Image (cartoon, rainbow, N blue to C red):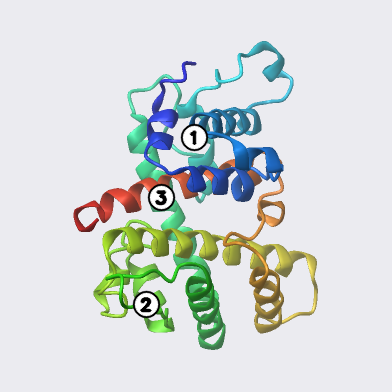
Amino acid sequence: MSRNDRLYYLMEQLEQPDLLFLLQNGLGKTEAKYKRCSKEQLMDAVSSELREAASHSFANFFRLEHEYPYKQILIDVANKLSKYNITKYQLDDSHSEEEIEKEILRLFDLKAKEWWEKLSDAEKEQVAEEMSRMINARLVISVNRKTLIKYRIKKEVMDSVITKGIVLGLLAVSAGGVLGLAGGSVLTRIGWAIVSRAAGFMHAAKFMGVTIGGLSGKAILDIVGGLAAGLSVFVPSTIYFYADTNYKKTIPTVVMLLSKVHLRKTFSSEI
């Protein structure tokens, strides 16, 4: 598999901090050496680590470093996100990689909606507050070089965003007027933060609900909030709700990669 496949095409659209974020928060690579890497080196690292995580370790002995097909990674992620753990896609069929990518984002939107609907109003308020706290702490940006605007995500905003689609319907974020003054680049960053933080809450809550008995949803959320407060954006993939070693890396990495590219495209006219 060449370094000229679609995975590299998508990574080309990201900035170095985005690639470093994928390595750290998706693939669990926290070595300091990556902070000194060029964009090309980070792209190679993401490609290598993602393909290794997605393929059988024994089979890797017989493959080149970047050989595992990107389309097969997408198929595996789509299968795992689907309700019945199976989709219509096959490696040698006529379905394009772009088609499978759209299906992955659609399936993730459905997962987010199911998760959100199970939360109480109080839990939704707390999640929204955590979103606002994280955005204000890390993503406050000068919109016109004179005015700093703090962005507040309310429960009603999250209701709208998740109902319409946390990724595919991200324009809902700006529709409510709360973020209406933000430019495209700001919305892209905020949107990606919402996707990654929501994914962290979704899967951390499910993990804790399974492993910690006797706690209410509110108590679980308090724990999750406490953990998340000291982390970057995405709750570490080590508590991802899929036990399989490869999926706890491939699913968040692919979802974050595709959502970032989609958001950039969605708001490109405003940048």
Choose between 238 and 89: the one closer to the eye.
Answer: 238
Residue farthest to the bottom? 122
Q: Which residue is mark 3?
A: 260
Whether residue 133 sits left or right of residue 99 in the image: it is right
**Label 1 crowd bin: few (<14), some (14–19), many (20+), radius 10 Å:** some
Kind of residue at badge 2: Leu
Mark 1 belongs to which amino acid? Lys
Real-space Cα separation, disc 3 to disc 1, in angstroms = 16 Å
Residue sitting at x 61%, y 19%: 65
Q: Position of residue 240 (x, y in %)?
A: 66, 54
Given this view, does label 3 or label 2 mark the residue nearer the observer? 2
**Secondary-structure class at tag 1:** helix
- Measured in 3D between alpha carbons, the distance from the residue under mark 3 to the one under mark 2, in whole angstroms, is 24 Å
Camera-side residue of 224 and 100: 224
Location of residue 245 by image quarter: top right
Marks 2 & 1, CB-CB < 8 Å contact: no
Please report the residue visible at 61 percent of the width from the left and 14 percent of the height from the top.
64
Image side of residue 159 versus residue 197, left or right: left
> Which secondary structure, mark 2?
loop
Q: Is residue 270 above or below residue 230?
A: above
CB within 8 Å, label 3 to label 1: no
Q: Earlier in the sequence, mark 3 or mark 1?
A: 1
Residue bearing the label numbered 1: 39
Q: Amino acid at mark 3?
A: Lys
Q: Which mark is residue 30?
A: none
Q: Residue 204 location, x and y as percent? A: 66, 64
Does the image show residue 250? yes
- Name the image quarter holding the C terminus: bottom left
Compared to residue 124, the image places residue 143 above or below, namely above
- Counting from the top left corner in percent of width and height, residue 257 is at 46, 45
Q: Which residue is denoted by mark 2 in the rendering?
A: 148
Disc on the earlier residue, 2 or 1: 1
